[in-house]
């Protein structure tokens, strides 16, 4: 597996756009707070590192990953954001609940973006266990929150050009 040998949050090979003119919403799940808190910190850090102003970043907490879709929809319905970042963590359990949640969230995030014609970024960890989540939330494989932030910046810049 490629992720076992590299930091997935290395963006040294690309030119990241200037985020200073963009407004972002970050919708973050409260469930698995140890992980989602680290993802949130990574996202904010990634945005600010590329020029986003603290005043142009709004954090919206929702109960769990399933509610990320509703949170993104409410954010775009009520305010003008250039991009929305959805952050959550779903860890495989003993039932099929994992599959239903992951599928619903992935489709929901995509549909909200299409509904509003705005970038809505899927920053949701879907892991087999807690250690994999920790490794991707600031651990040895980087921070998926930062990756989602860079994606949001890049997509907001593309949307502005088109």
Image: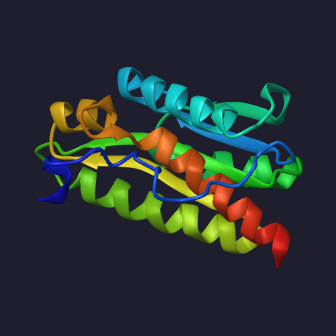
Query: Residue 146 in the image: x percent, y percent?
Result: 50, 40
Query: Residue 18 in the image: x percent, y percent?
Result: 75, 49
In the rendered image, the quadrant that contains the C terminus is bottom right
Residue at left offset 83%, top offset 35%: 56
Vertical position of residue 161 compared to residue 24: above or below: below
Left or right of 81 on screen, residue 70: left
* Viewer can see residue 119: no
Residue at left offset 49%, top offset 27%: 30
Vertical position of residue 30 compared to residue 117: above or below: above
Query: Residue 15 in the image: x percent, y percent?
Result: 60, 58
Which image quadrant is residue 23 in? top right
In the rendered image, the quadrant that contains the N terminus is bottom left
Left or right of 158 on screen, residue 129: left
* Foreground pick, 100 / 3: 3
Vertical position of residue 67 compared to residue 82: above or below: above
Residue at left offset 83%, top offset 73%: 161
* Viewer can see residue 79: yes
Residue at left offset 82%, top offset 50%: 81
Left or right of 115 on screen, residue 95: left
């Amino acid at each position: 597996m490629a992720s076992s040998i590299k930091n997935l949050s290395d963006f040294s090979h690309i030119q990241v756009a200037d985020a200073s003119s963009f407004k972002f919403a970050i919708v973050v799940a409260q469930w698995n707070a140890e992980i989602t808190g680290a993802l949130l910190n990574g996202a904010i850090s990634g945005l600010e590192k590329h020029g986003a102003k603290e005043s142009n970043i709004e954090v919206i907490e929702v109960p769990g990953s399933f509610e990320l879709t509703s949170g993104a929809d409410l954010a775009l319905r009520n305010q003008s954001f250039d991009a929305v970042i959805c952050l959550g963590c779903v860890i495989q359990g003993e039932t099929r609940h994992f599959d239903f949640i992951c599928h619903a969230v992935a489709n929901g995030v995509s549909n909200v973006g299409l509904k509003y014609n705005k970038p809505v970024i899927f920053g949701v960890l879907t892991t087999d266990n807690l250690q994999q989540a920790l490794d991707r939330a600031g651990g040895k494989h980087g921070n998926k929150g930062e990756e989602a932030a860079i994606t949001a910046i890049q997509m907001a810049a593309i949307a502005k050009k088109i």
